[in-house]
Amino acid sequence: MQVPAPFEYERANNVAEAIALRERLGPEARFIAGGHSLLPMMKLRLANPEYLIDINDCEELFYISEDGGEIRIGAMTRHRELLESELLAEHFPIFRDAEEVIADPVVRNRGTLGGSLCQADPSEDLSAVCTTLDASCVIKSTSGERVVSMHDFHVGPYETAVGDAEMLTEIRIPLKANGGSAYEKVERRAGDWAVVSSGAAVWFDGDTIAEGRVGLAAVGPNTTSIDPVSEALRGATPSEDLYQQVGEIAAANCSPQDDQRGSAAYKTHLAMELTKRALRRAVARANGQEA
Amino acid sequence: MTATEPQAETDERPIGFGRLLRKEDPRLIRGMGNFVDDIQLPGMLHLAILRSPMAHARIVSIDKSAAEAHPKVVAVITGEDLAAQGLAWMPTLSNDVQAVLATDKVRFQHQEVAFVVAEDRYSARDALELIIVDYEWIDPVIDVRKAMDADTPVIRDDLDDKTDNHIFDWETGDAAETEAIFASADVVVSEEIIYPRVHPAPMETCGCVADVERVSGQLTLWSTTQAPHAHRTVYALVAGLPEHKIRVIAPDIGGGFGNKVPIYPGYVCAIVASLVIGKPVKWMEDRTENLVSTGFARDYVMQGEIAATKEGKILAVRTNVLADHGAFNGVAAPVKYPAGFFGVFTGSYDLEAAYCKMQAVYTNKAPGGVAYACSFRITEAVYLVERIVDCLAYELDMDPAELRLKNFIQPDQFPYETKTGWVYDSGDYEPAMRKAMEMAGYDELRREQAEKREKGELMGIGLAFFTEAVGAGPRKDMDILGLGMADGCELRIHPTGKAVVRLSVKTQGQGHETTFAQIVAEEIGIPPEDIEVIHGDTDNTPFGLGTYGSRSTPVSGAAAALVTRKVRDKAQIIASGMLEVSVADLEWNKGSFSVKGDPEKSVTIQDIAMKAHGAGDLPDGIEGGLEAQICYNPENLTYPFGAYICVVDIDPGTAVVKVRRFIAVDDCGTQINPMIIEGQVHGGLADGVGMAMMEMISFDEDGNCLGGSLMDYLIPTALETPDWETGHTVTPSPHHPIGAKGIGESATVGSPPAVVNAIVDALKPYGIRHADMPLTPSRVWETMQGNHTPPI
Ligand SMILES: Cc1cc2nc3c(=O)[nH]c(=O)nc-3n(C[C@H](O)[C@H](O)[C@H](O)COP(=O)(O)OP(=O)(O)OC[C@H]3O[C@@H](n4cnc5c(N)ncnc54)[C@H](O)[C@@H]3O)c2cc1C
């Protein structure tokens, strides 16, 4: 049994209380959502927070809804709910693709979207999904709320724009017509983190792509959208050549490292190959060709 | 029938051999098992170990004052403290010594440096952070190939006159004879084949509860051990404790795979702590401690060579091995076998010559030697020969099945003495191979493969044929620390005909409580559910060396059969008195004796048991009671074998390997419980897929262990493993009382080469002849690019 260092525990009944606690307890306090990233780190004593503020009773953070041309997802929404949501599957099948290969059912029953994004692990799949979908994040504090793009949300590995006295409460994804999305991941074993994964989303205007985005995980300090990809896709007509070209741009814009999951050269290759595959499926889905 | 009575689907409730659900399962499945960590004693304290953050460093100073001041801490002990008692070092199982707590230097990352005993587990762990150790860095020796370089730091400067990192040189076979054959052979193939360091990773980590009774000095040790009797004697020898005052109890054990053969510093620390403090002390490793510090397996760099005629007759196999034993030589193997049973690297083939030369060295890595489903290094040997035979098939452009079939030892050659001196007891290889090929649809698979290759798709078919040497072993050749490798067994039949059998071996999940009841049942006709199997407690079982190297059935199983026959012989004499005929006029019909030619006149074993304990006279010279004890010394090892076929598909774009099918035909001689055999095979196959595709304990250049959690050290799940297709042939062992050979490690030995051969076969269009484990997607892709780099 691996045991964490001593800590104090508080349970917040709602968001207001959670934020107030966080403000009062200061930088040595941490929220605990699903606990599937934080607790392993505490057991290994890589994280030694003095206080845990449990936000599992903040009922207002559990939802997936459509509102004002956006899909809104509460920060405490669990992997399992993202996996099973028909609303998400209809608009953004990329979520289900990703959730099917994130961790295992035990982790998915507890782990949350908010926790995933706040963990800001460069291999986090949901960060890549949200990046691909151009999501934005609602961050609250006692003095109000602000909305930041995924691009600004991640400021480095394991670092986000969420300040010491702030809380991520919601993720918003714009709804646009004629879209398709898909996610591809290579892992060494089921339940393992990605060697590399790639998400792709496209929105059509007639036969041409009006907008397209790609988000990669595990190939750099953070998951990031790749602007040259979006430029190459804008106004393009889908073809195998296009997928190849975009795959190559993705590969050229990542900076993976050698580690036990794989060599940098392999990861660069995967960035290309998986982007190609994700894009192909995203286009097919936008054209109603694949479930 | 109550729910506690086991029943299998096809259960005909055999009185003897056959399918039968495991007697132990109701308890384990309902969470009613009793593992070491379940043991709670009044006043019990908890021990936690401080481990070195560095792989190689001099200990300058240790300040334990802050830890001692922790309100819940009872004691803080360092290597210096132990040295004062003469307990800082302990002997390993292979004539080396290992530090219990480091005194001078730390020699591997996570080596034991100090321990804390506290009122609860949390406080013990917290107090570790309060111990301040000042280390002075020494360059570590991590690359095994550099361990013997001239300018390399000497790891074991604790040993007198040690000036390098050399442990031993060992050779087997005839060098000159082999060289002569290689020099004139048509075809010679050479390949460096690496078996990386892997870990047994049992679900239950290692630990113990030590309880030294102050007045009597009696030590009771509940511990995660596969060999309770051997451990008791070792404690007596090293700690100078009188052996009759030591009781070792192995309660339920959650997997061993060799990991629970060695004696770890933690056990000794707990005993010392209980002795000093006078209270029971529990030590239980956490997952990281288990992975980074306990008995690993493999770690052989093998240069393999094979010589053959151009028609594919294999003439000789030769190998040069560099063995990484870590910082202390803790290999668990019979004393005369420093490389275990690696000598069976000649495989299942009729060779003209064979030779192996090995050098073992120290590195700054965790010790603990061979452990793991090890078959005493047979896993490495089988991997070497089955890989190099495939390399030969590649060079000859010959079907690997055909090549194997052409070279098998023939049935009439048994008993067959190999060129390295092993006498294979029995074998009939071709039918097993043909059966596997038939189950697989081998020819059809090859046709499918050819079509796929046309289309650029990657499909591979891998074969492996293995022969193991298990059941160590004859006492004339084999001992561990001077203890002969025999096993005792005791059987008592109670007056009502129920029985209790006491074993010297210990299950860690293999199902001894069922299998051994079935062996006794087969011999004496009492139903298995009426036979209680007692094991794992040195005070209540006869002496013997324990369960590892697939030795339980070959050695202890033989003891169980023979002790039962001894009881039956006595029963026959009593029956002759009851039926008033001579012993020679009695006939045994599993469960009863009847008068020859007059079957109506019979007595059951239950009747006889009552008579043996009851009133009235017994035949002359016969004592009351119905029980016996024996000690079985095997006359030879047993040699199980099998034919495995693996089919894989590889995605050419991502290099992801999917194991599509796996066919395993095993021959373990007489089958006691086919369901348990299948279970052993399933587990071993999963293990083999793990080793072939994902498992490896690796280190960075500073000696940091990179496999310290199950997110880093990957073990396969149901999703990486196909539905196993199992089959069997039966070639009994001629010298074993029931003809059984052992099955515990067959699949873990036979499957890695089958998987690797399949992956390499799939990559044939890329001109690839060899790739090293673990074949993760990245390594497969790199191999496809021609960048095959050895894992170590
Ligand atoms: C075995 C295993 C396998 C896994 N495999 C994968 C995988 O394949 N792919 C993948 O993407 N992930 C994987 N994960 C991670 C998993 O998805 C985690 O659940 C997730 O990363 C974190 O979510 P959580 O709710 O558990 O967060 P927690 O662990 O509770 O928190 C993580 C961090 O976020 C902070 N935080 C949480 N919520 C908020 C909030 N609302 N506002 C501000 N800060 C907050 C916490 O303080 C903490 O620092 C795996 C985890 C495990 C244990």
Image (cartoon, coloured by chain):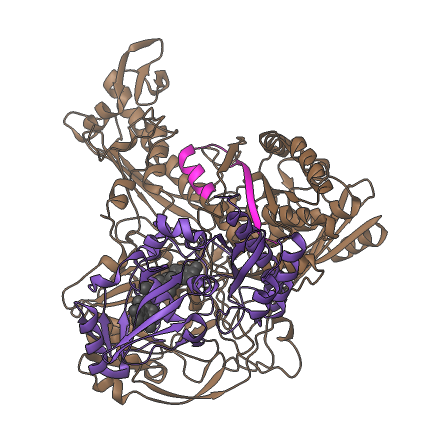
Chain colours: A purple, B brown
Q: Viewer-proximal residue, B487 or B262?
A: B262
Left or right of A114 on screen, residue B353? right
Q: Left or right: where does residue B703 sit relative to residue B512?
A: right
Front in this rendered view, residue B579 or B236 = B236
Left or right, B72 with reference to A124: left
Is there any visible trace of residue B776 in the rendered image? no
Quadrant position of residue B241 = bottom left
Kindly indicate the quadrant of the structure image that contains residue B660.
Answer: top right
State the residue lying farthest toward the front. Answer: A206
In x, y percent, where is residue B524?
Answer: 32, 28
**Where does residue B628 sit, x and y in percent of width and height?**
30, 38
Q: Is residue B784 above or below residue A291?
A: below
**What residue range appears in magenta?**
B655-682
Q: Going 26% across and 53% down the picture, which residue do you hit?
A: B539
Residue B219, x across and y down, in percent: 24, 64
Pinpoint residue B270: horizontal percent, then vertical percent: 28, 70
Ligand 1, image quadrant it occupies:
bottom left
User: What is the quadrant of the N terminus of chain B in the image?
Assistant: top left
Q: Is residue B678 magenta?
A: yes
Residue situated in front as seen by the camera: A149 or B201: A149
At x 27%, y 44%, the residue is: B29
Q: Taking B482 as reference, is B540 above or below it?
A: above
Task: Verify whether residue B569 appears in magenta.
Answer: no
Residue situated in front as seen by the camera: B81 or A114: A114
Which residue corresponds to the image point at 24% horizontal and 44% vertical from the top-left? Answer: B30
Quarter of the image where the C terminus of chain B is located: bottom right
